[in-house]
Amino acid sequence: MKNVKPKSPKQSSKSNAATVRLVPARQRSAYSAAEVEEIFRRFSVQRPEPRGELEHVNPFTLVVAVALSAQATDAGVNKATRALFAVADTPQKMLALGEEKLRDYIKTIGLYRNKAKNVIALSEKLIADFGGEVPRTREELVTLPGVGRKTANVVLSMAFGQPTIAVDTHIFRIANRIRLAPGRTPDEVEAHLSRVIPEAYLYHAHHWLILHGRYVCKARRPECERCVIADLCKFPEKTCDIPAPLVELPPQVVPVAG
């Protein structure tokens, strides 16, 4: 048997340092576990029951609404889908409506022609492969035309109560801006957030972050004076380090389609 010379303490130290450097500092969370816990504790006080703002009546209409929301606002999608879901709230009814009539309902949404094709195609696949029911696994959901990982995660969370992180533009911006869970891609940010967010807060986490990004930590000018985590925030360009009063916000009013 070949003798293996043991590493000296100095050599081991160098090896360990090299291993740590495999994760660049810029890609690590800037927060301690206690700080992350406090961030989400405050979000939970501010919005005990956060809700998504896309109107839907069942898992199928949720899949459609989320697919339509790519590069569009929730408000714009809701405006278009109220009338659509009144006449087509199942895959069968969507197929009966047809692609041409579907386009008329959603023509105010960006990329509506391609999205109409995808909605018809995913309706066909749901009927052919899943008995007209929306599947409950990410692996099956992403086989639907126009459904990517983000859409699948939203559906798993909102329709089936699974704790997932759906990384949209708001979450991607915030995770990198405040250095909570830096990542170069949405998948990296999702994986990073899943590691750092305490399990007790994971189910509501993506809604808290989306709503924080939509109404407070805005893309063009963050409203730091309205932020309940201003004192904890590590954003170098924040304009305020005094947190806003931690009070429960009025319940969200999210109309139900149909």
Image: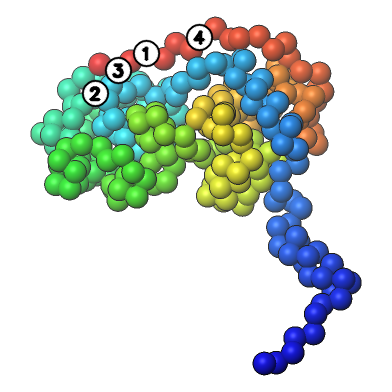
Label at residue 251: 4
Mark pair 3, 1: CA separation = 6 Å
Judged by depth in the image, the label closer to the viewer, 1 or 4, is 4
Name the kind of residue labelled 2 in the image.
Phe
Q: At which x and y percent is residue 98?
A: 14, 36
Between the residue at mark 1 and the residue at mark 2, the CA separation in whole angstroms equals: 13 Å
Residue 257 is labelled as: 3
Please give the name of the residue rendered at 32% of the width and 23% of the height, measured from the top-left corner: 56
- When asked about the image quadrant of residue 181, the answer is top right
Quarter of the image for residue 77 reads top left
Mark 4 belongs to which amino acid?
Pro
Q: Is residue 207 left or right of residue 237?
A: left
Residue at image point 41% right, 15% down:
254
Badge 1 amino acid: Pro
Horizontal side, residue 147 vs residue 185: left or right:
left
Q: Residue furthest front?
A: 1
- Dot 3 or dot 2: first in sequence order is 2
| Discs 3/4, front | 4
User: What x and y, as percent, mark residue 193?
Assistant: 59, 41
Q: Earlier in the sequence, mark 3 or mark 4?
A: 4
Residue that mark 1 sits on: 255
